[in-house]
Structure formats: structure tokens, C-alpha cells
Amino acid sequence: MPDQYLENTAYRPILFAITIAVFMCLLDSHIVRICLPVIARDFGISSGQTAWINLAYLLVVAPGLPIFGKISDIVGHRTVFILGYLVFIAGSMLCGISPSYYFLVFSRFIQGLGGVMLIASGPSMIPHLIPADKRGVAFGLQATAAGLGISLGAPLGGILTELLSWKYIFYINVPVAVAGVIMVLKYIPKEPHADRLKNLVKRLDITGALYLYFSLFFITTALSLVSKITSGPALFFACMAFGAIFLILFLQREKKSPEPIIDTPILSKPFILIMFSTFIGYLLMTGNTFMMPFYLMTSLEMTPATSGLMILFFSLSFSFFSSLAGRLADKTDPRILGSLGMFMTAAAVSFFVFVIANKSVFQTALFLLLYGSSFAFFVAPTNKLMISYIPKNKQGVANGIYRTAVFLAALVGLSVYGSLSDHVGASNMVPLFSTIYFWSIPLPLASFALLYFSRLLPPLAD
């Protein structure tokens, strides 16, 4: 996509079209979880089988992000973005009309294919179309949309399921996606059409792409099994072994490929440090999101509905401050803002460790507010900092790597914190969770250090 910066307010419809995709993908991820018990009842399956309804989506998105990032760099981000919307619409409709459990799992694979195309290509258009002094705002609005998607997922899913049917949690994607397609067609400039398919066949290393996909597929599957490693370690280690084998094959292939999927210049020291910082930050965020409902419903004796409203303190503060953080990132050093955000996250977790034994609703709400606002000052500035180290013709694959780090962090976070919380009960809730949060404090401090020292090289010229 040729650079075509849009001044004044002309970039806003483009940003809106990209933001819709982010909102929709995250809303869909969280809206499904609340309805799994109802789906299990309707199809007569076990609760364990319902895990594949989420896993099917994840096993397409997480391994496919770098590959579809590369494809969007070759054929054009707009093209992949539109196709992603169309595939997501088809997948959502198939999920809604699913007559059986297996058809629903298959449909979730299709939906995941659309989701990975949207996530890999959408944010990559920002450096090409949004002026440099507006990109912090752009990434801030994306973070806001992500927070709203996470916040509205559970309550909206519960309402739709109770009033209509669980099928409508998928149908609701259709009008949202159609609106996104219309915005893309109307406002995002067209890309050159010449020899698009020929360039893809010529430049995409299909063998290398398959090696990378299977490597990440097996590693992702293994990470989803971490919580069961003590009871069934064979499958975990088998998946990790296959992942390592395909990763070695991929790296060997990359050395010989004239058009590598992941170019070595992308993997600069600052970029790698930013990726590790992001991974650690999202690892902790996922752990907190997983554990907090147990604390609220056990120690504070809240109902599921009240617990959901309490967690909104985190989600809504994250959404609100993300926009502000993005604006500030356009005016000051995003490295400083992101580092400050993660340092304040460490302070928020330390505060919660200090007050967790009080079982105070007010103090818990204050912790969630502090954590949400602190994490907001990490996400948007870090996104802007990352793209400053990536050439514009490599934005797609770089964005794919970044998003893969986020997805893998979520998997590891759920597995690790889930294992730590396996034996939680009313009697040992406070001591156990106090210990878990205490030993979590080094995580944001490590993320802070990695991000602060990431600027070892100057960013690329815009």
C-alpha cells in the first residue's frame, strides 16, 4: 500500500473501520465464554468438550498472525482486510446455524481465519494512512475498542442468550462486520491490482509458512495444556517437541529463502525487548483477569453479576485512559510513557497485596481502577514505539509477531495462573492469592526494565 497520509479529519473513518474489527474480534472472543454451559446443554456435550469451541478459534489466530502479516505486506493490507471481514461474516453465520457441536467447532475455525486476517492487516494500515502525529491517538482508540470488547462481552453474551439464543452471539457480528466493510470500501484508498496473485506465489515461501504455522500450532497447543502437565505430561512434551522440530526446520529454511517470512532486520534488539516486555505485561493482565472473579465471589461473597460489574472498573478505566495515553504518546516519548505505565502497574499490584486481607470492596475497586489506568499507559505508547523500528513494507509481519506475543501471553497466563489457583477454597483464598500476587510483582518490574532500555538504537525515519 503506497503511503497516503490523510490530514485533518479525513483519517477518522479509516480509523473507525480498523477499530470496528478490533472491537468485533475481542467481543467475539469474550462473548462466547459466558455461553459455553448453555451450548454444552443444547448439544449434550461435556464442559471439557466446550473448550474446543474457544481453542478452534485460537489455534487459527495465534499461529497464523505472522503468516497473514507477511501476506498482507505482499498483496496489500486493504485486500486482506476486506477478505478478513467477508470470511468472518461467513464464519459467524455458520456458527449461528450450526446443527451440531462438530459443525460449530469447524465454523469457529472459519471464523478464526477471518479474525487472523483482520488482526494481521488492520493495525498495519495505520503507519501508511494515519499521519505520524496522530498514530498515538490511533493506537489509543484501538486499545479503547479492545477494552470495550472485553467489557461488553460477558454481559452482552448473557443478555442475548437469556432473551434470544446463544446463536445470536454470532449473528450480532454480521451487521457490525458489514458496517466495517462499507467503511473500508468507501474510505480506505485502493491498492495497485497488477500481478497481485503472481507476486504472492513468487514472494511467499509456502514451505516456510507451513513450517512456521505448524511450529506455532504445536507450541500453542502445548501452552494450552500447561495446567494439566502434572496429570498428563506426555501430550504436553510431545506437542513441544513437534513445535521445536518445525521451528528448527523453519529457521533453516529462512536462511536459504530469498524472501524470508520473518526478515532478520525486523528482529532488532529494541523490537525483541519490546516483544518480551509486551509478553510479560499481558501475562500478568491475563492472570489477574482469571483470578479476580474467584476472589470477588469467594472472599467478597459477590454474585456473578456483581462480580462482572466490579471487573468493569478495570475494563472501563483501561478504555478511558487508553485514548489519553495515545494522545500523550504523540507529544512525548512513548518509551517513557509505556515504562511509567508498567511501573505504576507494579505499584498497583503491590497495593493490592497490602490490602487483599481486608476484603474491602472499595479497596478492590480502587486496585482495579489503578491497574486499568496504568496498563492503558503501557499499551498504546508501546504500539507506537514498536512501529518506529519497523520499515513500512514490513509492518504486516511485524504486527503479526506482536499480536502473536499477546495471544501466547494469554495462553501462558491462563495456564500458569490456573494451575496456581487449582486448589482455591474459601478457607485459603486470602493467603494463597496474597502469595500469588506478591510473587507477581517482579513481572511488571521486568516489563518496565525491558521497555525502558529498549531504545538501544534510534527509530527509523518516518
Image (cartoon, rainbow, N blue to C red):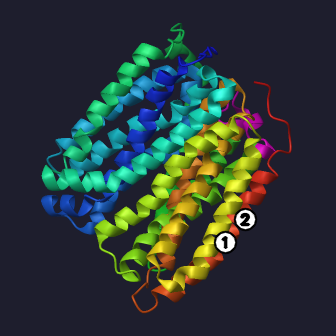
- Type of residue at label 1? Ile
x then y, percent, for residue 226: 50, 69
Q: Which residue does the image show at 43% across and 20% down from the upper left?
A: 184
Which quadrant of the figure has residue 98?
top left
**Which circle marks residue 14 in the picture?**
none
Q: Would residue 399 be visible to someone looking at this image?
A: yes
Decide: is 5 above or below 236.
above
Determine the secondary structure under disc 2: helix
Q: Is residue 188 magenta?
A: no
x then y, percent, for residue 304: 30, 70
Along the viewing direction, whichever of 53 and 245 lies nearer the viewer:
53
Decide: is 26 above or below 82.
below
Q: Locate the C terminus and report the quarter of the image it occupies.
A: top right
Question: Is 359 on the left or on the right of 202, as rendered?
Answer: left
Q: Which residue is mark 1?
A: 441
x then y, percent, for residue 433: 52, 81
Along the viewing direction, whichever of 321 and 183 lies nearer the viewer:
321
Q: Is residue 262 magenta?
A: yes
Please state the extent of the stretch shown in magenta in the rendering: 254-270
- Type of residue at label 2? Leu
Q: Which residue does the image show at 38% across and 81% down from the upper left?
A: 298
Q: Residue furthest top?
A: 194
Verify CB contact (< 8 Å) between mark 2 and mark 1.
yes
Q: Which residue does the image show at 47% across and 79% down from the upper left?
A: 360
**Which circle marks residue 445 in the picture?**
2
Q: CA distance from mark 2 to mark 1?
A: 7 Å
Which quadrant of the figure has residue 172?
top left
